[in-house]
Amino acid sequence: MLKDPQKKYQPFQTINLTDRTWVNKTITAAPIWLSTDLRDGNQSLFDPMNGETKLKFFNELIRVGLKEIEVGFPAASDIDFKFVRHIIEENRIPDDVTPMVMTQAREDLIKKTVASLQGAKRAIVHIYNATAPAWREIVFGMSVEQVIALVKKQVQCLKDLTDQHPETEWILQYSPETFSATELEVALLACNTAIETWDAGPGRKIIINLPTTVENTTPNVFADRIEWMDRNLARRDAVVLSVHPHNDRGTGIATAELAILAGAQRIEGCLFGNGERCGNVDLVTLALNLYTQGIHPQLDFSNINKVAKIVEECTKLPIHPRHPYVGDLVFTAFSGSHQDAIKKGFAVQAGRELWQVPYLPIDPKDLGRTYESVIRVNSQSGKGGIAYLLERDYGIVIPRKLQVEFSAEVQRITDSSESEITSAELYQLFEKTYFHQATDESAAIAYQSHKTGESDIDGQQWIELSVSINGIASKLVGKGSGPIEAAVDALALPIEIIGYEERAIGSGANAKAIAIVEINHQDGYTKFGAGLDVNIVSASVKAIISAVNRLGV
């Protein structure tokens, strides 16, 4: 049993922001995106990426449309240093893409970081230091005054070094690491110190990045903190306000979205949420959340399967099958009621401009995915999903009452196997349950052939059925107003047809016809039968015999 949390954990205090405005805002445009897959994401892997793998990932980030990419921690890793040099010296960085590198607020590390970027057209140098009480007191043994002095000294160091290389456009990003647990006044003082020391102003921007280094509050509390900082930062016009959410509480997405409402202009994260502990915020989900609200994220995920494949290859981490928008099963419905609603949605969606299919917030085709796996059938499924698969993959449109009848047979099979049934297996079962019932030699009546004609006496149509009855070849003759009525007359059984449908499957010379009949026995019970043939009369006769055999008369 869990211990009493009140004796061990202190709740994080909210701030007194009674005039908050973010609650009344909506997101109207995409933020600036920064991918930290090659740095924060990479440092959390079992096997960090080598230079070749990082380059493959880097190229995919560019293809997707990322304009700011954190490419590594060159002062801490020789692989990262060489990678940064490689993409600069080999002109691998497009003119509209800005690389970012990270360094702790230490002079020796800053010098090596600047050296790694020599020759770059434009670069962001990300300096950070921890500011929260637990880190100040436990990890570093520093007072607030010492922390602020450190920020001033190291930002000045960076400024002096970069001023010596005017051929590069330098941008400082400063992060009060552990912002989410830092007193707001201390965080503000650290950020304003960086802003003033860098001498931010027109033409000399600074990025102030406020991380939820460890997520420790509900997203609304973080939003209040962002709005407070947004109001109080010095030289605000020269500041790009950025956030770097982590996912310790599982609310990284909400934290990022509310932070945008509260004034954040930029989001740092990893494509699929990789990162320390529970991960960084998931950029793909954030971007596609915007897309479903009619806002273009300015990132291209029209081939999401390719993106996912490259990320999985580079990180050696699988993407969860229920990952939003991307997982293998995220567009898959097993539930019967869900399948029925989706089937009806697809039926009316054609020709509509706005997407409106129940249970599918986004059109899978917009992401380069197909509808193949949208509906799959197992023991939880219903008639709607079964009917959808038969129609989509085999052109078989079955009436609602037949859906009910056949779904019971499917349920029996899936309950017995305790597994999913594929579309091909579903068709085979339909074939066995209906089509084969007319031609199976072991059935009570097995269809072989027929002849039809018109009587010269009364104008009625006649039919001669060649069948096998309990294994004995027989010929049955009947009359009626049409071949179907004549076939029923030939069988001479206490039955009547109460439902009949026919339609073509396919087109051209290879087209077939399917006939579906519902037959009522005089004792009051009914069964469906189905027949498939290139000739509609043959298909209809097979359907009648199928239903008769299924009735057991």
Image (spheres, grey):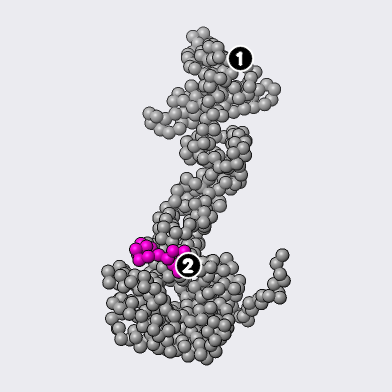
316 to the left or right of 86: right
Location of residue 180 (image quadrant)? bottom right
Q: Is residue 409 above or below residue 174?
A: above
| Residue 30 on image: x %, y % | 45, 68
Q: Report which residue position mark 1 lands on.
A: 492
User: Does residue 109 belong to the magenta stretch?
Assistant: no
Q: Which image quadrant: the C terminus?
A: top right
For the point 61% across and 44% down, the residue is 380
| Residue 187 on image: x %, y % | 53, 83
Task: Name the residue nearer the viewer: 23 or 320.
Answer: 320
Q: Which image quadrant: the N terminus?
A: bottom right
**Where does the magenta region start and end?**
41-57
Three-letter residue code for mark 2? Ser
Task: Name the residue nearer the viewer: 485 or 171.
Answer: 171
| Residue 356 on image: x %, y % | 52, 52
Task: Name the residue nearer the viewer: 2 or 198.
Answer: 2
Give the Cα separation between the discs numbered 2 and 1: 77 Å
